[in-house]
Amino acid sequence: MASLGYLVFVIYCISLIYITIFCLTQLQLLWRYKKKGIVDVLTFDKNSEDLLPFVTIQLPIYNEQYVVVRLIDNMCRINYPKDRFEIQVLDDSDDETLEISRKKVKEYRKKGFNIELVTRETRTGYKAGALQHGLKTAKGEFIAIFDADFLPKPEFLLATIPYFQNSNIGVVQTKWEHLNQNYSLITRLQAFQLNVHFTVEQSGRQAADYLLQFNGTAGVWRKETIEDAGGWEADTLTEDLDLSIRAQLKGWTIRYLEDIGSPAELPAEMNSLKSQQFRWMKGGAETAKKMLPTVWKSSLTRKKKVHATIHLLSSTIFIFVFLVGVISVPLLFALGPLGINADYFTFFLVGLLSIAAVYYVANVQASWQDESGMRAFFKFIVMFPLFLSLSMGLSLHNSIAVLQGYIGKKSPFIRTPKFNIQGITDTFRKSNYLPEKIPFTTFLEGLLAVYFMGAIIAAIYYNDTTFIFFHLLLTFGYGAICYYSIRHLRFKNS
């Protein structure tokens, strides 16, 4: 039993060390972010419209009947000379979305827009396949890409295309903004997390001259860059991250524009969020497996290679979060017999404090500027532990995705349903895109909530509250994930 206890202790410590190192790398990006300085803003000469380059706007769509109308309407409001851009509606839908797209394209063609509907007989390669297929007939020197839930502002092209005057820049990525972040706790917590990526992470990497990533949407590619890097490939679920790495290894630069926002709809129900998370986590692992050997064989500096590795392995954090949670329960009962003082674990609080600082700056200082300082501070005090709890609750689901990515288990590209949710009065209750079956992992999440609740009861009974706050977060996190996964399924039949 002593050997088993020491094994549990070792696994727990290794997991904590990994999590702490990850948090410290985030803190290093925060330091770079705070030192980034003033970023130059480039514009076109308003008197030289005839010199504006031709742009192709690609809209990859699959079964988006609730948002396809607003998407196409919005794209046709882009403030750019009509004869200098085209719109490709890349619609692979097999439901009524396709007919809606066809009618909207016909409507805008009559109004003089250069817009076409591009369909395929089979959905080979999913989103990557659609983008690559559209590229064959794209006339633009530059390719702007938007997912179905994005509504870029009219000045988007005028604000981004000027940066390509630097011939080394192959991609311009803009910041995601959130149309419906105040819709529910689920959307608020997503915005809370995404704000970190689109401030501290992206701008911090840019300031440090590390590898960045195109986020799959709300950005513009130089067509030559896509072709030079080998084109869109569908062997991972994150074709955007994959092509980003390949392009930068070819010598191209990604320019991130934090001050240019592109509003989008956040997943409003739990199963859509889990579907999105699964694709991102599994795709990140697949891309790491595919690209890390190439990264380390490249001519990048050692510092860039190390940070590219940390970036590509970032989804792996969920495996260690899951292990720390599950193992903490038997460890609670092993510490005493092993003679280990739990106070030693306080060292690892440096990781928690580091990540708290990152989230504070990204949200309170960078994203909540319209709110008073005191209100923003107290909002953060509430949101941060809730975010930690939700992340812990997703760790089982995301760990499965990561492990599948590393072992090479293939799965289809499952798009995240959009429901045109913007205000609190909008609903997804009667949507056709809600799943009908409860995944097995949802039952496991419910069992884990009971598991950690049992640990809390045992801790109170034995008067050992070493992990009680941690177990409270885990109980709430797994319980909330399980509850909302089932509750949102029931809307289908209501």
Image (spheres, grey):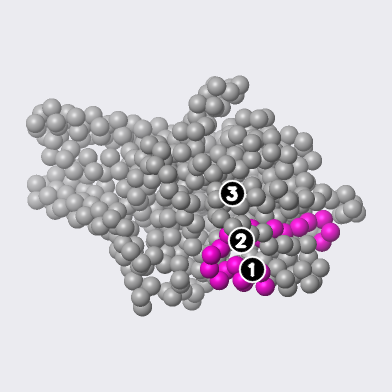
Tell me the quarter of the image containing the C terminus: bottom left
**Helix, strand or loop at mark 1:** helix
Work out how far the residue at label 1 is from the one at label 2, CA to CA, in angstroms: 8 Å
Labels 1 & 3 near each other (Cβ < 8 A)? no
Q: Which mark is residue 101?
A: 1
Work out how far the residue at label 1 is from the one at label 3, CA to CA, in angstroms: 19 Å
**Helix, strand or loop at mark 2:** strand
Look at the image and give the residue range highlighted in magenta.
Answer: 82-103
Q: Is residue 373 above or below residue 182?
A: above
Q: Is residue 490 above or below residue 229?
A: below
Amino acid type, mark 2 = Asp
For label 2, the residue is 91
For label 3, the residue is 129
Q: Quadrant of residue 65?
A: bottom right
At 42% from the left edge and 64% from the top edge, which residue is drawn?
269
Q: Is residue 153 magenta?
A: no
Labels 1 & 2 near each other (Cβ < 8 A)? yes
Labels 2 & 3 near each other (Cβ < 8 A)? no
**Helix, strand or loop at mark 3:** helix
Q: Is residue 276 left or right of residue 457?
A: right
Residue 102 in the image, given as x and y percentages of width and height: 66, 69
Dot 1, crowdedness within 10 Å: few (<14), some or many (≥20)? many
At 35% from the left edge and 75% from the top edge, which residue is drawn?
493
At 88% from the left edge and 49% from the top edge, which residue is drawn?
51
Amino acid type, mark 1 = Ser
